[in-house]
Image (cartoon, rainbow, N blue to C red):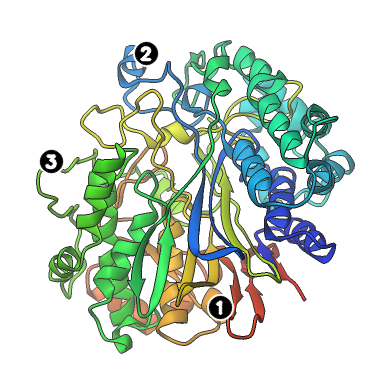
Amino acid sequence: MSASTHWLATGAAQSVLERGGNAVDAAVAGAFVLHVAEPHLNGPGGDMTAIFATADAPGEPQVLMGQGAAPQGASVEAYRRLGLQRVPGAGGLAAAVPAAVDAWLLLLAEHGTWPLAYVLEAAIHHAESGVPVLPSIAATIGGVAELFREHWPSSAAQWMPDGQVPATGSLMTNPDYAGVLRSLVAAGEGAASREAAIEAARHEWRTGDVARLATEFLAVPHRHSDGRDHAGVIRAEDFASPAAGVEDPVTITFRGHTIAKIGPWGQGPVLLQALMILAGFDDAELDPGTERGAHLILEALKLAMADRDAYYGDLEPAEAARRMEVLLSEEYAAARRAQLAEAASHAFRPGVVDGVEPATPPLDEPGSDGDAAAAGTGEPTVRGDGEPRGDTCHLDVVDRWGTMISATPSGGWLQSSPTIPGLGFCLGTRLQMTWLDEASPSALRPGRRPRTTLTPTLVLRDGEPVMALGTPGGDQQEQWQLPMLLRVLVGGHTPQQAIDAPTLHTTSMPGSFFPRTWEPGGAVVEDRLGEEVIAGLTARGHRITRAGDWALGRLSCVTRDPATGRLGAAANPRGAQGYAAGR
């Protein structure tokens, strides 16, 4: 079974499964198609995280780490010297070392079965023959058309080839990116094994034309979202070291299930902390469709998000483990649970981790230009200066043998920075999630990963993976997964029912994306939650933003019943774009 945020990626993944490939072969094929089909939501110059379990070791889930680090020239001091108070939301200064491609190739080499040429066949075809322009792609390009014309001519050449915003439904090609993919395949020709050929492609990606062209191009000053021209600081030597890796997940037990997530270098433990807090309530109180359940979910998320901003970051392993031991403990969850009140909190309230001074990020409220509402829905909007209100992609795959993977690719959006001539894509802007404050656990530091929002989930029961899920949505990713999990694990919903059900999230935390504002007590809800529930939340002090009936969340998932081997999948109906398939 395959599920993703775009039907072409699901189709590519399912085609691989139908022809005998495993879930890893299928996921990699689908991921490279997403680069072509949703370039406003992810790109080869961006990043990704995944969590997977193989049929050979089902009880040993692993995290695929595709989040690149800050270049050696990126530091708080260096950016402060440029007069910056925050890392820009668009432009080369926000680029971390791109790690998505390296991560997918690493996974394919270690756990796939197909040669690279077969896996990339669908992506090359779509890049050369074209994919239909989505309404959101047209809207994104339209939002930055003036920036492209006046300051980023290489982007205009790629995404506005006739000088106009492409029409919805027209075909969009990317021959330069097809050429990059062909060069990766060519790098492994004559290699002694499938694995050696893929390793040769990884080496080509890190040291060949991609690294050279990207670093030379971004070294030329170009327009950033602060309205000034800056040169990027990423260099060829930053590309050269392997950026991807595999590591152990962070886990908790909730209602008889093991929930596995990425570590505190991302926001993965937010979901775990929220579940630990909510675990102390009766099942009947955890229905997201009730006033009580919705209120408890919002309040638990605020506490977990405050801890995210106070304590998470790319820490030394021993320190990260120590903080997780406290933040995910029964005792800490009980103390945080006691802080939940009947009224909505409008405060930033991190907990207490002994021996650690909690960081307090700037708590700036947005202006009156509607930015908070646009960012709060998690939809792919963008300002005219390139400052992103970006989104992401997602895909899940499970095969007949039981290998299961959930992956969230992102970054390298077409609006992130100027398109690199000859490559057909730009680098990402993940460094905007760092702070120019040395006291912050997620401060901008050379060689350290920014605290990513990319956070897929794997659920296990009795040591066997039973569900892989995730969603785009930046700060909302954990928040939209939480109601879904509660509906499935507590409420008895099927995964499709849980995805279809109305959802909500809080904006009462500093945003991870530039300009990093928050809305104290803010809550965004789908109108289908119901007038009675929404009125009750308002009476409790939540500052409600109505998003519409079908606006929040782009969840997908795959499932497996270990007892029968039966597989399942579910996809998001919002936007009529996601798709689940299988047999």
Q: CA distance from mark 1 to mark 3?
A: 40 Å
Q: Position of residue 292 (x, y in %)?
A: 28, 81
Q: Which residue corresponds to mark 3? A: 357
Is residue 221 found left or right of 276 in the rendered image? right
Nearer to us: label 2 or label 1 = 1
Q: Name which residue type carries label 1.
A: Pro
From where the camera sits, is residue 308 visible?
A: yes
Q: Name which residue type carries label 3.
A: Glu
* Residue, far left: 355
Secondary structure under tag 1 reads helix
Q: Which residue corresponds to mark 1? A: 495
Indicate whether 214 appears above or below 323.
Answer: above
Mark 3 crowdedness (10 Å alpha carbons): few <14, some 14-19, many ≥20 = few
Q: Name which residue type carries label 2.
A: Leu
Is residue 12 found left or right of 259 in the rendered image? right
Indicate whether 498 appears above or below 504.
Answer: below
Q: Position of residue 359 (x, y in %)?
A: 19, 40
Mark 1 crowdedness (10 Å alpha carbons): few <14, some 14-19, many ≥20 = many
Image quadrant assignment for residue 177: top right
Label 3 near label 1: C-beta < 8 Å?
no
Of the two numbered discs 2 and 1 on the same chain, state the one appearing first in sequence.
2
Q: Which residue corresponds to mark 2? A: 82
Residue displayed at 31% across by 21% down: 76
Q: CA distance from mark 3 to mark 2?
A: 29 Å
Q: CA distance from mark 2 to mark 1?
A: 49 Å
Mark 2 crowdedness (10 Å alpha carbons): few <14, some 14-19, many ≥20 = few
Instruction: Find residue 512 and name its label.
Output: none
Secondary structure under tag 2 reads loop
